[in-house]
Amino acid sequence: MVAMGEANTAPFGPTAARQVRRFFSTEPTPLVPLKVAAEKWGLGGIYVKDESKRLGQQAFKVFGATFAMAKWVARHVGVELEDVSGLEDLRAKYEAKFGAGVQTTFVTCTDGNHGRAVAWAAKQLGQKAVVYMPKGSAQARVDHVRSHGGECTVTELNYDRTVDLAFQKAKENDWTVLQDTTAPGYTEIPTWIMQGYTAMADEALEQIKALDGPASAPTHVLLQVGVGSMAGAVLGYLVEAAGDGPRAKALTLEPENAACAFKSAERGDGEMAIVDGDLETMIAGLACGEPSALGWPILAKYVDGGFFWMKDGLAGNGMRAMKAEGVEAGECGGAGPGLLGRLMAKGCGKAEEARKKLGLVEK
């Protein structure tokens, strides 16, 4: 059990999101309407953010890891990130000050996409990445890290204990931890990573208005939770963007065997629950047992639609629903549509009761 801190959404608002977008200067990833699913489930519209297009790394994680590394490098060069025109310019400034080949080693733990993102960012900025993965990690995920020049080791530990190992190795070798999981005295880099994630929320609100009209806004948002950094960042953005006005009702979702946010909410006593053990789940990217001390307080205060855990098979259902409409997604991406499909199931009293409470009213 870990005591809950204060919910601080201020670092994750539109100002941060637009700083991230200005730095990368890339086109927004697609916001795809799932028209068949919306018709099947009787909803006015369902949109998914297709993060497979994000800097060629097939996941939103690359904006978080790269933005955080860029902030770290800029600080050590002695420049403001706002005065840098992208990754190439920042690398040139670093090498001009320290010399080509002088590297900082960034170490991290990952279930897959975050480690790939750290390795990619290190390659772009002329740095070194060392990545540890929990037991059972797929070889393809290891290969993705190594393809960008990162060192990668699969441990015999679960995700949270592998995070501990990364911190231990950093201390032993004078490396820099680049992790979205918080630790005592370690919140600045996780904050920067979370700020990187806000860009997709900023893009999505713009895209919905472009698709459905300037007065359009989402009524509900489904947020996957691993440690809760992405969910906390996106919800923090939505809270800040809404101000005193209405905002989308927020739901979180997690695998049954790694539902640390659900368990924390269930406690209801201001403390974060830790889920231990193997955390066995098909949804590997969400197999985390300890909530982020930055993300969890935001979720605890502002999630108004409920904390949900889900069976692995629902993620598979979501993947198939998305593929039928031309969107390739992994288990984490499929989790949201999978849960939504379960909530909209016909002939199920529990689902009907839940969707009435959520205001998921059929059109």
Image (cartoon, grey):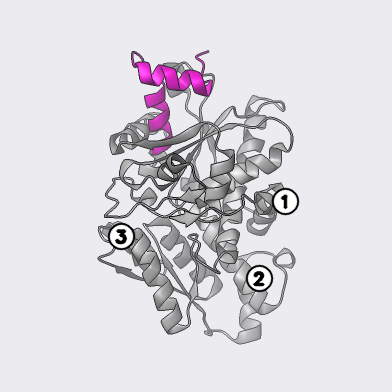
Question: Residue 216, how many percent across, how many down?
Answer: 67, 26
Q: Residue tagged by mark 1?
A: 15
Q: Residue tagged by mark 2?
A: 89
Q: Is residue 345 visible?
A: no
**Left or right, 73 with reference to 337:** right
Q: Amino acid at mark 3?
A: Asn
Along the viewing direction, whichever of 287 and 41 lies nearer the viewer = 287
Q: Amino acid at mark 1?
A: Thr
Q: CA distance from mark 1 to mark 3?
A: 36 Å
Q: Is residue 205 visible?
A: yes
Q: Amino acid at mark 2?
A: Asp
Q: Residue tagged by mark 3?
A: 158
Q: Quadrant of residue 94?
A: bottom right
Q: CA distance from mark 2 to mark 3?
A: 38 Å
* Element at label 1: helix
* Element at label 2: helix
Q: Residues within 10 Å of mark 1 (few under 14, many from 20)?
A: some
Between disc 2 and disc 3, the foreground one is 3
Dot 2 and dot 3 residues touching (CB under 8 Å): no
* Element at label 3: loop
Q: Is residue 70 above or below residue 33?
A: below
Q: Is residue 143 above or below residue 242?
A: below
Q: CA distance from mark 2 to mark 1?
A: 22 Å
Q: Which residues are magenta?
A: 335-363
**Left or right, 78 with reference to 288:** right
Dot 1 and dot 3 residues touching (CB under 8 Å): no
Magenta span contains residue 351: yes
Magenta span contains residue 51: no
